[in-house]
């Protein structure tokens, strides 16, 4: 049985490893590029997930967003008429910098977003719930997000649902990368 000191030391090294990965943009981009998914067409497996988010959370906007060097690109989206946005205005840029969901109840009250063109103009974002899409090797490559045009609180069940569906997105990305052949 490990001593408390050994457990703390192991947890400390795991935390340090995670911080290192979150700060490793080259590694993050490499992980994203391994999926060979940017600028590909719609795929039903991903569209189903964004539809479930829309239905379960009653949000007018949902997306699977992948973040590269200059932009966020939407693999699947509901309620948006663009394929992506500049990374410097993307809420998802903030989401991929942490290991926990990003929750914004009212973007007009958050100093990071109050002057953001996605808040002050179309699509008029007011509330946002985003969960990082973490690759199996620990890099945040994008997000699964639910967006509303009115301020709102996301309850624990909504956050848990989105977190579970984000894991499903990564699972589908892995299957897409390494398809299982059925005879």
Image (tube, rainbow, N blue to C red):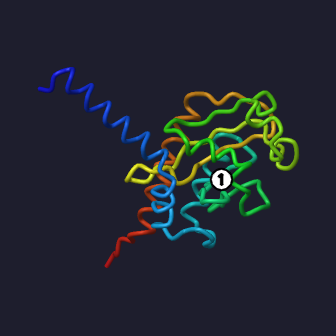
Name the image quarter holding the C terminus: bottom left
User: Which residue is situated farthest in the top direction here?
Assistant: 4
Q: Nearer the viewer, residue 112 or 155?
A: 112
At 39% across and 71% down in the image, what residue appears?
179
Q: Nearer the viewer, residue 109 or 26?
A: 26
Q: Which residue is mark 1?
A: 63
Rendered position, 174 above or below 155:
below
Measuring from the top left, give residue 67's x and y in whole percent.
60, 56
User: Which residue is situated farthest in the bottom direction here?
Assistant: 183
> Would you say 124 lies left or right of 164 here?
right
**Quadrant hosting residue 130:** top right
SS category of the residue bearing label 1: strand
At 48% across and 45% down in the image, what residue appears?
22
At 50% across and 66% down in the image, what residue appears?
33
Rendered position, 171 above or below 61:
below
User: Which residue is situated farthest in the right direction here?
Assistant: 121
Measuring from the top left, give residue 158's x and y in whole percent.
59, 35
**Quadrant hosting residue 6:** top left
> Would you say 63 lies left or right of 36 here?
right
Name the image quarter holding the N terminus: top left
Measuring from the top left, give residue 70's x and y in whole percent.
66, 59
Q: Badge 1, how many Cα within 10 Å: few under 14, some, many 20+? A: many
At 32% across and 30% down in the image, what residue appears?
12
Rendered position, 162 above or below 142:
above
Q: How many marks?
A: 1
Rendered position, 90 above or below 150:
below
Q: Nearer the viewer, residue 96 or 165?
A: 96
């Amino acid at each position: 049985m490990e001593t408390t000191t050994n457990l703390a030391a192991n947890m400390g090294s795991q935390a340090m490893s995670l911080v290192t990965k979150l700060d490793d943009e080259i590694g993050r981009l490499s992980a994203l590029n391994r999926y060979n998914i940017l600028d590909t067409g719609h795929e039903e497996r991903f569209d189903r997930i964004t539809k479930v988010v829309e239905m379960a959370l009653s949000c007018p906007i949902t997306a699977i967003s992948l973040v590269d060097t200059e932009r966020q690109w939407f693999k699947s989206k509901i309620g948006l008429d663009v394929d992506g946005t500049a990374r410097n205005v993307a809420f998802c840029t903030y989401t991929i910098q942490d290991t926990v969901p990003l929750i914004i109840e009212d973007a007009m009250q958050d100093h990071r977003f109050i002057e953001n063109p996605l808040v002050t103009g179309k699509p008029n974002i007011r509330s946002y719930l985003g969960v990082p899409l973490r690759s199996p090797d620990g890099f945040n490559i994008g997000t699964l997000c639910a967006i509303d045009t009115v301020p709102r609180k996301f309850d624990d069940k909504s956050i848990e649902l989105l977190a579970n569906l984000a894991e499903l997105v990564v699972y589908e990305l892995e299957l897409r990368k390494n398809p299982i052949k059925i005879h």
